[in-house]
Image (tube, helix red, strand yellow):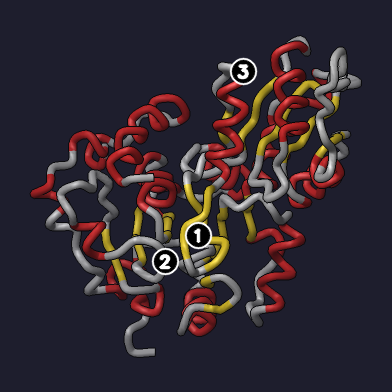
Amino acid sequence: MSLLLLLLMLPLLASAFLPPPRPSLAPSLITSRLLASVPRLSSPATWLEGIDTFVFDCDGVIWRGDSVIDGVPGILAKLRAAGKKIFFVTNNSTKSRKGYKAKFDSLGLDVKAEEIFSSSFAAAAYLQQTKFLEKRKGKKVYVIGEVGIGEELDLIGVPWVGGPGDKDKVAELSPGSKVEHDEDVGAVIVGFDRHVNYFKIQNAQLCINENEDCEFIATNLDAVTHLTDAQEWAGNGAMVGAIKGCTGVEPTVVGKPSPLMIDFMVDQLKLERSKIAMVGDRLDTDVVFGTSNGLQTCLVLSGVTTEEKLLSDDNAIAPDFFASSIADFYPEA
Ligand SMILES: [Mg+2]
């Protein structure tokens, strides 16, 4: 997707799913003159003093694919030694928190499961917050997505169907044939799914269009994602777009830049919003997630965004600072 198209979509996404952005950082108010002054993080010690909690995006910040980014283990250790709280927030719903913990372990990073917030977890947390089990007695969830969503639903006892089990199902199109959908589905969750197929789309369409008060929940709307480092790949925006296209229904988005995950963290963990720094490599998810939710923001250039893209006149999203990577937090290390 071109940057121009992405920028054209941003106001729509923001108005649909976000509270009003902080006036000082609202993308529509930022001029190219202001953007030209987005400062490089040059006095990290001073900045770190004012922050209690770091919220890190994962891919492009902590790791790239299956490789830890240079210097990250030492920086995380220093932040912990300085008494900072650390959390990891990712829009990738293919894994549960347990699955991410295994990935951190495999990369030699010592992280607690409760420090990880994935959009698969956010989808389950949303159902908990809205009391799906209590208010929709006997109802279940239909999942388009990989194992992460189902694992998180299992943890909160919400029954679900679909997911990886529908990988090889085919919608027969002979005369009179039809897909039999489950009339007890009260919510459809759509997350990134490498095995999305027409059967799943038709099933979700029937649940949303025909079941009474069936919710449509999207883990995230990322247009593209990095499955390999060779190119950009179609992200969950593609799966969500398919279901929007056949239902005309706008989803409830639970991942970044929706406020749900940060609201959950602030409420549950009693965090002070102004002393939280969101650190990410994407402007449209990570930085918007921070600026729209009252957090400090730092864009790192270790992922998908180049310095040229950040400072170009075409970009209307400004972080407080940018840095080459989180290694810049302790430059003497
Ligand atoms: Mg990222």
106 relative to 280, above or below:
below
Left/right placement of residue 267 relative to residue 96 reads: left
Q: Which residue is mark 3?
A: 247
Q: Is residue 53 visible?
A: no
Amino acid type of the residue that numbered disc 2 sits on in the rendered structure: Gly
Q: Secondary structure at mark 1?
A: loop
* Mark 2 / mark 3, whichever is N-terminal: 3
Residue 129: percent from the left, percent from the top? 69, 31
* Mark 1 / mark 3, whichever is N-terminal: 1
Q: Which residue is mark 2?
A: 303
Asked if disc 2 is less than 8 Å from ligand 1, the answer is yes
Which quadrant does the N terminus fall into?
top left
Q: Which residue is mark 1?
A: 57
Q: Secondary structure at mark 2?
A: loop
Q: Residues within 10 Å of mark 1 (few under 14, many from 20)?
A: many
Q: Nearer the viewer, mark 2 or mark 3?
A: 3
